Image (cartoon, rainbow, N blue to C red):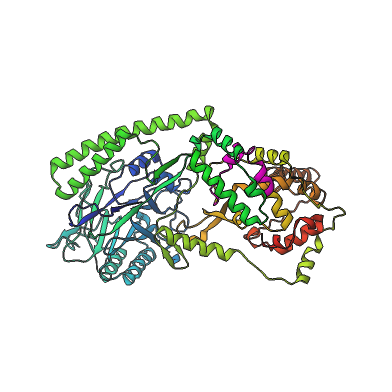
């Protein structure tokens, strides 16, 4: 674990966070170009309007690993048109940022984001007012209300910025001594909506600071900032992010970020490198080990704990460790490209500090070299991925799958008005959410018996399960290869490769739960991962949890599932497709469509009823489940201890 200063300033002076803004007039025609621009970006905040994006473009693919994205795409709620428009606010992950939403603002193409700097918060709104909505008084009033709502929440030290394309070419601006811009009544034409907008900003004490005009000497992109003694520094960007857009010059805004003695912990994770493990020597050592220390143990929890400790010692001996620091390195980056990126960032810092023309030209030259090499590296990376289609199809389709889904978690997350902006706090929010899903309903014996009455009583029963070496070997062959361990730190790959010398301890460990009716406590542990379902990615309520179990109980399940399934198979409906071998949702859909087509051919009616049980597996009462299994003839396998599985 290492500590590094959060701020980039060298000697206690003020550091700067840089915001880039541009109306890009469409990103969807050059997604890869923007991906490369974000991966090599010098800016802490990137605000874009007229993105023209829709739900087919994932933010994680567009922004990579360095930025959190907050988007508002065009849709039927906020526009009369279905294409074009849209705004994007990308904030570097090193900054704590979260979105501020209100359902009454859904009619606007805007995004409000709260960003925490070292000494204050910055509330940033990125907005696009299309030409056909500039005279819509309701739209203007809604936006003004959002500004006033944020103003009421801000503290005196906080800053508010509203930046975007307002499409008011009839407004002209004149500068003042403090750097703020004021409407020029002699050269401007004020519509009712424009007056309402300016009055609202005046009430919120926001003033316009952009004096950079386009080639028509008009200012379509405006930036309103909290009133201070001196206006913030807004300037023309040295180069556009991807392309120059007519009528919309790219802008940069420097935000002072007062330096403080805060330090950020950089984690260097040490983990086993199972790909470099010396399995041949490990197998020999395991084979020579005296496993009687496990075989004589009658307490299942102690036996499992001893087994895990022994395997852990062998892993320390025969499996090397690797240290990996968490970086945001893109997969196509080369050492030369990373060197150019560092030089580009250094040149940008000097340009931001001194602003001379030679420094601007120097930055542009490095930026051109970086962009040229970045495109070549990315093209070579794509060619390597495409070549995997023949040599390694799994890796190719993993790449394709990653492009279709969002990855990672936002740096700031919310659960019922509780905000978390660090890893520990975010984990606690997810723990609080997932714990509410599970139920532990207390039922009487009569209720349990009544619930199990719909299960037919089996004529036969299973009093024991064959746990010989052949059954364990057959189960190990079915175990999927994985180098990702569960809480016991034993991966499935190790069990598969070392199963022969482990037959004696595994056989004893598998017999103990069946003999004592007690499931090991360690085997109940699991790593839980949040998976986004739908909606806002920063809202914990929009996630479901999946569990990564230990590999040893997975192997135990494969050993006992075959005889149990064979015993219960006669009672399972032929229409059941879930959780059955060689059946899936695909076979279910195939049978359903065949039935519907047959109904069409016979001119008969076909009705379908769809039901969905919320968090069904999390709410299953285990005592009822055990009672049903007992009626199936599995009573001898499930003693009282199994009720707590």
Q: Position of residue 403 (x, y in %)?
A: 48, 42
* 500 part of magenta stretch: yes
Q: Is residue 628 above or below residue 577?
A: below
Q: Quadrant of the C terminus?
A: bottom right
Image quadrant in which you'd find residue 209: bottom left
Residue 457 can be seen, yes or no:
yes
Q: Residue at point 34% right, 71% down?
A: 153
The part of the chain drawn in magenta is 487-508
> Residue 324 at x, y = what percent?
40, 43
Q: Where is residue 555 drawn, in percent x and y? A: 65, 45
Give left or right: position of 508 versus 466: left
Q: Residue at x 42, y 65 (%)?
A: 419
Q: Nearer the viewer, residue 514 or 228?
A: 514
**Residue positioned 72% across, 38% down in the render:** 470
One can see residue 92 in this view:
no
Which residue reaches farthest right? 459
Looking at the image, is 369 positioned above or below residue 215? Answer: above
Residue situated in front as seen by the camera: 256 or 138: 256
């Amino acid at each position: 674990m290492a500590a590094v200063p959060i701020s980039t300033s060298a000697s206690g002076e003020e550091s700067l966070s840089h915001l880039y803004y541009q109306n890009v007039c469409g990103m969807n025609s050059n997604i890869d170009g923007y991906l490369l621009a974000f991966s090599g970006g010098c800016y802490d905040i990137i605000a874009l309007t007229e993105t023209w994006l829709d739900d087919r473009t994932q933010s994680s693919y567009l922004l990579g690993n360095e930025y959190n994205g907050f988007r508002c795409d065009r849709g039927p709620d906020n526009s009369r048109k279905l294409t074009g428009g849209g705004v994007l606010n990308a904030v570097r992950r090193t900054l704590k940022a979260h979105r501020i939403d209100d359902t009454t603002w859904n009619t606007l193409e805007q995004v409000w984001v709260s960003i925490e700097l070292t000494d204050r918060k910055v509330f940033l709104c990125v907005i696009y007012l299309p030409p056909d909505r500039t005279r819509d008084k309701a739209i203007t009033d809604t936006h003004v209300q959002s500004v006033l709502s944020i103003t009421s929440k801000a503290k005196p030290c906080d800053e508010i910025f509203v930046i975007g394309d307002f499409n008011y070419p009839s407004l002209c601006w004149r500068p003042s001594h403090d750097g703020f811009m004021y409407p020029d009544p002699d050269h401007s034409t004020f519509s009712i909506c424009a007056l309402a907008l300016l009055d609202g900003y005046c009430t919120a004490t926001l003033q316009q600071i952009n004096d950079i005009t386009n080639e028509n000497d008009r200012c379509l992109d405006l930036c309103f900032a909290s009133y201070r003694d001196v206006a913030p520094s807004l300037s023309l960007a040295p180069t556009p992010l991807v392309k120059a857009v007519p009528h919309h010059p790219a802008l940069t805004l420097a935000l002072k970020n007062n330096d403080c003695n805060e330090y950020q912990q950089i984690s260097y994770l040490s983990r086993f490198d199972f790909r470099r493990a010396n399995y041949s020597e490990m197998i020999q050592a395991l084979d020579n080990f005296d496993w009687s220390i496990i075989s004589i143990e009658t307490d299942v929890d102690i036996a499992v704990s001893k087994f895990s400790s022994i395997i852990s010692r062998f892993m320390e001996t025969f499996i090397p460790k690797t240290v990996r620091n968490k970086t945001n390195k893109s997969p196509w980056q080369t050492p030369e490209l990373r060197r150019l990126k560092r030089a580009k960032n250094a040149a940008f810092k000097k340009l931001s500090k001194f602003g001379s023309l030679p420094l601007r030209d120097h930055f542009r030259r490095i930026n051109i070299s970086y962009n040229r090499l970045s495109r070549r590296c990315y093209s070579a990376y794509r060619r390597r991925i495409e070549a995997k289609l023949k040599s390694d199809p799994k890796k190719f389709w993993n790449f394709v799958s990653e492009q279709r889904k969002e990855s990672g978690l936002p740096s700031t997350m919310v659960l019922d008005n509780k905000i978390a902006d660090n890893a520990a706090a975010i984990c606690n929010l997810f723990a609080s959410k997932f714990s509410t899903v599970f139920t532990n309903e207390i039922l009487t014996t009569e209720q349990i018996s009544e619930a199990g009455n719909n299960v037919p009583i089996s004529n036969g029963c299973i009093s024991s399960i064959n746990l010989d070496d052949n059954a364990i070997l057959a189960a190990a062959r079915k175990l999927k290869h994985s180098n990702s361990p569960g809480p016991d730190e034993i991966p499935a790959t190790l069990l598969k490769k070392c199963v022969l010398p482990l037959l004696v301890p595994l056989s004893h460990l598998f017999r103990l739960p069946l003999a004592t009716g007690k499931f090991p406590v360690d085997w109940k542990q699991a790593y839980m991962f949040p998976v986004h379902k739908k909606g806002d990615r920063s809202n914990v309520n929009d996630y479901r949890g999946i569990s990564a179990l230990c590999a040893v109980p997975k192997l135990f399940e494969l050993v006992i599932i075959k005889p149990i399934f064979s015993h219960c198979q006669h009672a399972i409906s032929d229409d059941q497709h879930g959780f059955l071998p060689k059946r899936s949702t695909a076979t279910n859909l195939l049978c359903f469509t065949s039935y519907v087509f047959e109904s069409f051919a016979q001119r008969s009616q076909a009705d379908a009823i769809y039901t969905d049980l919320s968090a069904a597996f999390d709410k299953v009462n285990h005592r009822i489940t055990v009672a049903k299994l007992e009626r199936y003839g599995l009573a001898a396998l499930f003693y009282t201890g199994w009720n707590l599985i």
